[in-house]
Structures are given as C-alpha cells and as structure tokens.
Image (tube, rainbow, N blue to C red):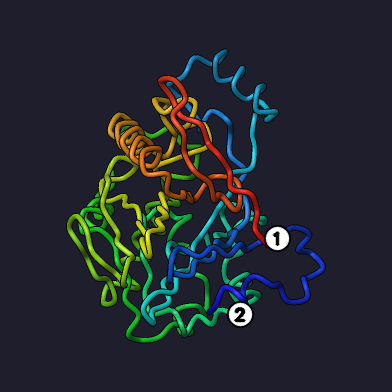
C-alpha cells in the first residue's frame, strides 16, 4: 500500500457515486481513511441528556433533520514499519438490523487494492458491533492471515463478558445486537487477541491508548512520525461534541466519564494542532480542533488530491 496507488481510484462501481477513501501521510506513516457507509439513527442519540429545544436548535443551525440523520462510519488503514494495520472493522452485515447502506468495508478495501491477507494487525477502539462486524462477515476470517494480531484493551474484553447497559439510550434491538456481536467476535477470534492494559505500540509510531468512557476499554490510536501527528479517536468524539462536549451520546456506557474523556482529548488536540479522525465524523473526517470559548470548534482539512 502506498499513498500514490491508493489515492487514485480504480474505475468506480456504478453504485459508488461519492468518494469512499482518502489518503493522508503522517511523516513516514501512510494512512487511508475508508468509509464503511452510513448508519441512520435517531437524533436523540446525539444528546439524550440535553434540553430537547436546545438540541432542536443545534440541529437546525447545522441544517440537519430533527428526527434522524446518517452517521458516518469511518475505518482507517495504516502502513508503518512493514506492517499493515486495520483500525476498526466496520459494521459488517447484520440481517436483523436492515442497514443496507452500512457495512461497505470489505468491498471498499478491495476497491482500494488492499488484500485482506496483507493485513498484519487489527486494532479495535472497542467492541461495539460497528467496529468489529466486518470481521464477522461470512468468508472474511478465512481470507485473513493465520498469524493476524488483534489488539484490544483487556478491560474491553472483560466488559463484554457481562456488559452493563444501565446508562445507555439506544434504539430497540441494539443492546441485543451489540451483545451478540461482541460474544461471537470474542469466541471466533480469541486465539488471535493481543490484550493490553493501558498503552501499547503496535508498530513504529502507532500507539493505542485506553481512554475508557464510551466503553470501559475504549481506546484511541495516536500516530506520530517526523514531527507529524494524527489521532484516530474512535467514538470519543462525535459531531455535536465540539459545540457541546457535555452532551451524552446514547451509545456511551459511562456517559459522565465519556464527557470527561472527550474534553481532555479535545483540549489536548487543540493544544498540539495535530490531525483528528474519528469514526462518526463526516467522511473523510480529517481535520483539527480549535478552542472556541468554553467549547471547541472543528476545522476540517482542505481536501488534497
């Protein structure tokens, strides 16, 4: 994988009307952001602790519908030190959820010229279904190399042995689907899991660090090379989190801690000026963070092509 050969798309499929991958270089580290599609969810998921009128005003200011909108699903492929690292694995295909525009990762990896057998490592920010589901698609495991290493926080694996959904606010059906996906993933890939406690260097300049909050083992991945830095924040940051970092997302298992993690991370990113990518920011979700009064401001990168 090189930035040169992944930046220029092959002949697009007839149903692919928009770009689905975007290349970035972080020093000597090559990064490819890939869209796994979009996930339609109720807007209440953005902030179930917010005053409905304030939430409605924010949606109106953002030109977003009041009832439901499409959440982006972004995955990252990193090439560093001879290793090809997949950060998160997308939603996959759950026939019980009827989400036809999500779960696009496998075909989009193929379109980008990335062979599943070339992936040496997978890093999971956490084990929610939209981050592990791509590894559960029929036929995928057989295409992965047998010595594949899957890095995930030990606290995350422990949590999903008996997950607590007390403080979440999810649409019906999602808790059961999340439990089932995490259980199946742990069973199918247990021998390939490489657990870490707080921090682990996966490849040169590629460090995964546990933050907790969203889930007990939620982690972010920091890339650093030649003075350049980029953070993949997983689900620590959502679009609304810049303006209202204290609003609770419906998928957060510990929303109070998730808000603290979000503020700490955004404060750090604003101070360093490094690039940010996150799962649910609009594709390609590459940008930077600025402080804006007692909140933050998202500064999207100008596309480079």
Measuring 42% from the left and 21% from the top, which residue is drawn there?
49
Q: Residue furthest front?
A: 227
Using the image, tell me which numbered label, if any, was put on residue 297.
none
Measuring 47% from the left and 62% from the top, which residue is drawn there?
133
Asked whether disc 2 touches disc 1, contact meaning CB atoms under 8 Å apart, the reply is no
For residue 258, say whether it is visible.
yes
- The secondary structure type at the circle numbered 1 is loop
Q: Residues within 10 Å of mark 2 (few under 14, many from 20)?
A: some
Measuring 37% from the left and 59% from the top, which residue is drawn there?
227
Measuring 56% from the left and 79% from the top, which residue is drawn there?
114
- The secondary structure type at the circle numbered 2 is loop
Alpha carbon distance from label 2 to label 1: 15 Å
Would residue 207 be found to the left or right of residue 145 on screen? Answer: left
Percent x, y of residue 236: 39, 42
Q: Residue furthest left?
A: 197
Q: Choose between 35 and 70: the one closer to the eye.
A: 35
Residue 268: quarter of image: top left
Using the image, tell me which numbered label, if any, was put on residue 19.
1
Percent x, y of residue 39: 60, 48
Q: Earlier in the sequence, mark 2 or mark 1?
A: 1
Seen in the picture, residue 280 relative to 83 is either above or below; the reply is above
Percent x, y of residue 22: 61, 62
**Residue position marked by numbered label 2 in the rendering:** 113
């Amino acid at each position: 994988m090189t930035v040169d050969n992944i930046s220029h798309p092959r002949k697009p499929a007839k149903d692919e009307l928009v770009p689905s991958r975007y290349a970035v270089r972080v020093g000597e580290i090559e990064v490819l952001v890939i869209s796994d599609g979009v996930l339609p969810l109720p807007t209440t998921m953005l902030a179930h602790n917010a005053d409905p009128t304030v939430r409605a005003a924010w949606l109106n200011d953002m030109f977003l519908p009041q009832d439901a909108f499409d959440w982006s699903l972004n995955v990252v492929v990193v090439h560093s030190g001879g290793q090809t690292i997949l950060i998160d694995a997308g939603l996959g295909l759950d026939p019980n959820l009827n989400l036809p525009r999500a779960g696009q990762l496998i075909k989009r990896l193929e379109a980008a010229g990335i062979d599943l057998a070339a992936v040496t490592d997978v890093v999971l920010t956490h084990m929610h279904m939209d981050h592990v589901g791509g590894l559960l698609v029929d036929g995928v495991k057989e295409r992965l190399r047998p010595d594949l290493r899957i890095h995930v926080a030990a606290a995350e694996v422990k949590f999903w042995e008996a997950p607590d959904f007390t403080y979440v606010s999810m649409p019906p059906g999602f808790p059961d689907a999340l439990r089932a996906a995490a259980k199946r993933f742990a069973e199918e890939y247990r021998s390939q899991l490489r657990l870490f406690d707080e921090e682990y260097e996966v490849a040169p300049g590629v460090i995964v660090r546990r933050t907790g909050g969203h889930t007990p083992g939620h982690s972010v991945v920091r890339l650093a090379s030649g003075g350049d830095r980029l953070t993949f924040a997983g689900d620590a940051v959502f679009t609304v989190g810049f303006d209202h970092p204290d609003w609770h997302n419906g998928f957060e298992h510990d929303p109070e801690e998730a808000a603290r993690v979000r503020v700490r991370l955004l404060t750090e990113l604003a101070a360093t000026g490094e690039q940010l990518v996150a799962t649910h920011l609009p594709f390609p979700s590459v940008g930077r963070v600025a402080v804006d009064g007692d909140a933050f401001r998202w500064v999207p990168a100008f596309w480079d092509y």
